Amino acid sequence: MSWSKFPSLPVWLFVAALGLSLISVSYATAQEEAEVAATEEVTAEEAEVAVTEEAVIDAEAPAEAGITFEEDTTYTINTLIMFICAVLVIFMQAGFAMLEVGLNAAKNTVNILFKNVMDLAIGVLLFLFIGYGLMYPGADYAGKWFGFSGSSFVERDSAAPNLETGWSNSADFLFQVAFAATAATIVSGAVAGRMKFGAYLVYSAILTGLVYPISGMWKWGGGALAEWGFADFAGSVVVHAVGGFAGLAGAIALGARLGRFSKDGKSIPMPGHNIAFAALGVFVLWVGWYGFNPGSQLTYAGASNAEATTYIALTTTIAAAAGAVVAMIVAWSLFKKPDVTMALNGVLAGLVGITANCDQVTQVGALVIGGVAGALVVMGIVLLDKLKIDDPVGAFPVHGMCGVWGGIATGLLGTSIPEGMTRGGYIWVQCLSTAIICAWAFGTMICVFYALKAVGFLRVSPEHEQAGLDVSEHGMHAYPAHLVTDSYSSAPGSRSLTGSPNA
């Protein structure tokens, strides 16, 4: 057959083949798209079922553990925020260390830093084994003066969350032990420059293991003072006054640093060697106080708790600012020069004063409390000078005197008067309870310090004090030796007295 007879046939065959191909491709594509669509539909259905099942599991999980979703959420929020607040309070150790280092001689820097480390380390261990059980002995000891729940490690509540408190047992311990360490480290500044390191360890162990937990139980462990209606929200008295009066006992038992007072009783200034460190320390402490005071709300979940927590932060800030301003003004008027160290102590004074009542005073009340505390700290430093009691950083005026003021101010300005109690009754309870706790701290620790003194274990020798505790107690320098000058040149039988800063 000749293709010449059908000249258009190849074209038609090509067109037909192309058409069949397109039809086949279209059919295959349509079939594939249908299969994909069907697969995607099945996958979507399976995913929806999976999500639904997962949601059911999530919703039922708390129920299986015996708690509702709301309880589970509340427990989580409370635990995590309390943990953050505990870390902030622990970070205050760094603030105390910098403040004390800055306001003391350069040759005692290692000693001061070492003491602050051991306050926390010893405090954690002794509070774990003894202090925690003394401070929280349980309901059987409600309204009593002493109790002990036993020495044991913190019980985990992972299997059955502690809904009675609303936060984990571990977070609770971390928060409480941070407060114990704070009470102990307050003393470090009051006894700086002349106390044996071993004696300091003994003191720190007794305070964190026995003295602080027992008086803490009276208020926060449901003891006698709590039953009376004593209020101390975050520890103006329970923490700060305890540390302040323990520091006063230590300063009295030790006596003044060499050269601090002349033979005729004249006060000789011994400026700190690094005011920048001191200022940094105060700023760190101010930030840490937002764990100390707002953290003591303990329950943060829910609108009312969230508002209360931030209001506590507000009153805390107002009091700190008022304390700084008033301390500056009072010191300026007395000494004719604005003194930054007085303003720094004024910040701390305001913070200590508001700690007992930050949850229940008005903003005007916070201004008054902070302002009075700022004036008190300046007058307290002057008073110790007149009494020839050497407190290098002003630990007693800041924590002792302003801690007492915080307890009394709660009765005067607080709005949460216990039901059935008059304003006068509230003031009386605050004053009496504050006096009892301060007497307990001072009385026990003065006995401890004088007992150590009696056996010759309290104070370093004049030679070691003159050389500096870094070298004599620890065999090392914090700075190159040629940068450390001696402000203790008035040691008995020695050279002249300069009173110049250690730079």
Image: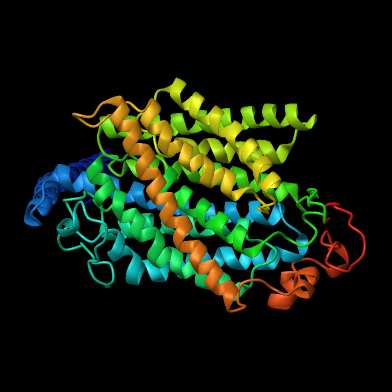
Instruction: Find residue 74 and report its horizontal and vertical position in percent.
Output: 22, 44
Residue 288 lies, with reference to residue 405, above or below; the image says: below
Q: Disc count in the image?
A: 0
Q: Is residue 108 visible?
A: yes
Instruction: Find residue 168 and report its horizontal and vertical position in percent.
Output: 26, 56
Left or right of 429? Residue 73 is left
The C terminus appears in which quarter of the rendering? bottom right
Left or right of 461? Residue 404 is left
At x 40%, y 71%, the residue is 125
Instruction: Find residue 244 and report its horizontal and vertical position in percent.
Output: 52, 51
In depth, the one of 9 and 387 nearer the eye is 387
Left or right of 167? Residue 83 is right
Specify the farthest residue to the top.
364
At x 33%, y 70%, the residue is 130
In depth, the one of 86 and 142 nearer the eye is 142
Q: Is residue 91 visible?
A: no
In depth, the one of 327 and 288 nearer the eye is 327
Specify the farthest residue to the front.
264
At x 28%, y 65%, the residue is 133
Instruction: Find residue 18 and report its horizontal and vertical position in percent.
Output: 25, 43
In depth, the one of 117 and 148 nearer the eye is 148
Left or right of 391? Residue 296 is left
